[in-house]
Amino acid sequence: MSRCDILISGGLLVDGTGDAAREADVAILDGRIAAIGPKLAVDATRTIDARNQVVAPGFIDIKTHSDWTLPLNPKAESKIHQGVTTEVIGHCGYSCAPALPGKAGILKDYLSPSAPWLTFIDQSFHDYLNSFPTTSTNIVPLVGHNTLRLMTMGLANRACSNDELEQMASLLEEALDAGAQGMSTGLFTPPGAFSKPEETIALAKIVKRKGGRYFTHLRDEANDVFSALDEAIDLGAQSGVHVQVVHMKLSGLDNWGKADAMLARVAMAREHGVAIDCDQYPYTAASNPLKNLLPRWVQSDKLDEMMARLADPANRARMRVEIDEHGLNNFGRIKDWEAIRISVSPNQSQFAGRTIADLAKERGIDGLDCVCDYLIADKCATRVLVDSISEDDIQTMIKSAHVCVGSDGNCVAPYGITGQGKPHPRFYGTFPRIIGHYSRDLGLIDLPLAIHKMTGASAHALGFTDRGWLKPGCAADVTIFDPAEFAELATYEKPHQYPAGASTMVLVNGTVTLDHAEHTGALAGHLLKRA
Ligand SMILES: [Zn+2]
């Protein structure tokens, strides 16, 4: 080779395998890595001087909900600025398709608390993918089990019939044939929570037969997290499908300190031949609709009904007792109401960033009354951050080579429609936080391992062979950054901030998409359909 499009010269190469850094140039031709080696003698249309910079594979965000924002922010700015070049979408059982004829409204009602700015239309999964916008990041689409169940049996609180299972199976096959990389479940919330393991195992067998993968938000992440993990492992054992446990965590004070035990159980399953991986985000706060924190019996998909239940003093008394005893639904016991912070509040945006403890004090009422009053005033559409995970458990998982990095965040930008409210800082900070805070500053893991956990390990969990590593023949997804400067700046109070690092460069399929920390506007991402 005598010519290439781009030569990345003089950088410190960290190739995604976990191997030590080495000095090497990278030559890129036609969107792929053409050669790697010290001092390559090759003419290039553009040479990027990477002296004193780390040259790594573009980061894979294995866990996102960017399908909710990519149509509004196709430049995926909060992701590109972090060095992310690939995003997996459609997680936790939520996908924006299929919507059967006449049923887009059901999907809209169901998803709009999480995706308030998105338009929903009747469309097959095939049409959804075919009309998906061109984006800056590569996209790996999943079809969601909650969506399949909604289309088949609405929010019915019961096991599916054989007919309904057949309908879900046929929609699933259609989505997989259209290019979905797999199926996601969100078993913590209706309607997935109403399914029995037999239902998800039957569907997982179809996913396996089609060569796809299974991604699960466990049925419980708090007081029953171990039995929920066992359910996922059992599904993997019975169906043979690869299982990804997404945003793995232990929520609630009573469950803290058990990350080692959880990782041991995953390792044991792997030893027994179950194909299983997991991922985490490096923050102690989770994000959820506020209403989901209350006992199940209070919740209703009918807004009037739910608001009436919230207003009733007898219901509040019953909730108070249950929460004192078991903690919050999905999250377990929290320290106090200081742990709940308003994130996005469509009808009361002035309170974004305030905690329930703070608002309750101001209003002279207790935390639970404050939650109920708040939900009524915000028509139950409030999203909150819940500080419910232990920092020790987070660090235990960070130290494990087997836990991939996923933000669980949407792509957003500090301006325009996605710049509203106070989203979780993980939307902007996940990847630089692992590299800057946990690897460089705390020294928990070395840089090659940190990068492996967000590139090669994720590529392996997704079954990729030509993305996630820097080696000849791979897609030229590359992130170049200054290892002394790269750091997250987003905070809970001021989340809409890109990471530090004025020299950061990001290439997607060989196209420069971030040039010295400026987005070039390039939309060079590929929609990565299942082959
Ligand atoms: Zn989830």
Image (cartoon, grey):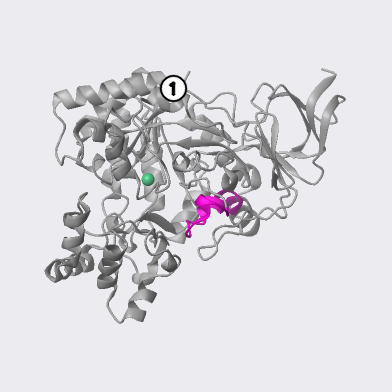
Number of marks: 1
Residue 146 vs 502, above or below: the answer is above
Please say whether residue 417 is one of the residues in the magenta stretch: yes
Task: For ligand 1, tell me if the residue under mark 1 lies within 8 Å.
Answer: no
Left or right, 145 with respect to 245, comes to: left
Magenta segment range?
A: 414-434
Please say whether residue 365 is one of the residues in the magenta stretch: no
Name the residue type under label 1. Answer: Gly
Q: Residue 29, how many percent across, how many down? A: 74, 22
Q: Residue 269, how many percent across, how many down? A: 36, 35
Left or right, 47 with respect to 293, comes to: right
Residue highlighted by disc 1: 179
Give the quadrant of ligand 1: top left
Q: Residue 380, how many percent across, how many down? A: 29, 58
**Residue sitting at x 85%, y 31%:** 39
Q: Quadrant of the N terminus?
A: top right
Q: Residue 481, how many percent across, how many down? A: 71, 46
Q: Quadrant of residue 480?
A: top right
